[in-house]
Image (tube, helix red, strand yellow):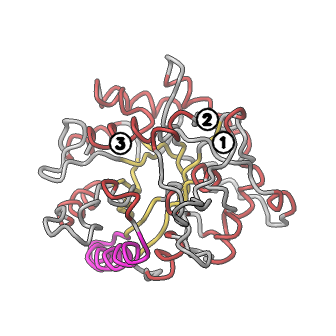
Amino acid sequence: MLQSRRNFLRLAGLGIAGGLIAPQFLSCDNAKPGSDSPLHNIGLQLFTVRDLLAQNPEETLKNIAKIGYKHVETFGADPSNGNHWGISTDQLKKFLNDNDLKTHSGHYDLQKYLDKDITDKENLEKYIEVAHNLGQEFIVVPVPPMHKLNQLDVASYQYMAEQLNKAGEMSKKAGIKMGYHNHFWEFKEFGNGTKGLDILLAFTEPDLVSFELDLFWINKAGESPQTYFDKYPGRFSQWHIKDMDRANSVPLDQNKLDPKTGKRDTINLDEITRTTKYTEVGTGSINYINMATFANESGLKYAYVEQDEIYSADKYASIKKSFDYMQKNFK
């Protein structure tokens, strides 16, 4: 999982710049979250420091805790043995406990499980066991079947929704809820305004499946988070907090029609990589002060800083800058 996710991110450049927050965010009347808000008690998606984890997981988690983070979201579980970055689940649990870090959620690769054409599925039971041992409340699917990204259609998303419901039934027995994390491709239209994320939201059971809204990617897709909060209140229990370089804030135009074929554009990950750049939270284009007014409506429980690419040599300084911004602005 670690290597495959890393390779994917190099290809897709999951440092993709998004559009500016929609103007309607500036006119909200909702109250700012209080001192125990998820945005003040911000976590870190560990993929942000994947290279450091690969070198020394124990030292990396220790330094994350020193910055002030109290919880982290994991990634990279090996389905064959439950290891993360070469250490066992028990070791990871010890390193977290030693540094007073909790983990409420983890990303688990279920691309085969969500592919209707593959019968050799990932070991979901093993993932549930790992998540349960770590004390996690959410198992989050980070991507759909990436090997057929441009072939995903309405039927594909309906099948994914069915599989998420089935997985949710299984994980519920362990007190864990299934989750799905969006990127930009879930907002590609299939006609009549129908989008992949809408299909997943409409066909999954709220008591079984939750959603982790990546605020960077929804803006990159040119969509309004407020629209989804209004239409599906309470469905987005987790957020990814990441910011976009101001010089690279133009949304994707993935829904334009090819005049020759009459079909939507295919997704060119290489091109997206070249037009994408991240930055530390609070230094880019997304206005999180206004975004926070929708926390209650969305059902927000946990939020995580994530920066898919850190361009400075000091990665700890980068994640501290994002952490400090969240602490300063959300009390």
In the picture of the structure, the residue carrying the numbered disc 2 is 322
Residue contact between numbered discs 2 and 1, judged by CB atoms under 8 Å: yes
Question: Which quarter of the picture shows residue 161?
Answer: bottom left
Residue 36 lies, in percent from the top left, at: 63, 56
Q: Is 279 rendered above or below residue 128?
A: above
At label 3, the amino acid type is Phe
Residue 248 highlighted magenta (yes or no):
no
Residue 158 highlighted magenta (yes or no):
yes
**Mark 1: few/some/many CA within 10 Å (<14, 14-19, 20+):** many
Residue 207 lies, in percent from the top left, at: 44, 81
Residue 326 image label: 1
Residue 188 lies, in percent from the top left, at: 54, 63
**CA–CA distance between discs 3 and 2?**
25 Å
**CA–CA distance between discs 3 and 1?**
29 Å
Quarter containing the N terminus: top left
What element does badge 2 sit on? helix
Q: Is 39 rendered above or below residue 314?
A: below
In the picture of the structure, the residue carrying the numbered disc 3 is 8
At label 2, the amino acid type is Ser
Residue at position x 69%, y 75% in the image? 230
Q: Is residue 331 visible?
A: no
What element does badge 3 sit on? helix
At label 1, the amino acid type is Met
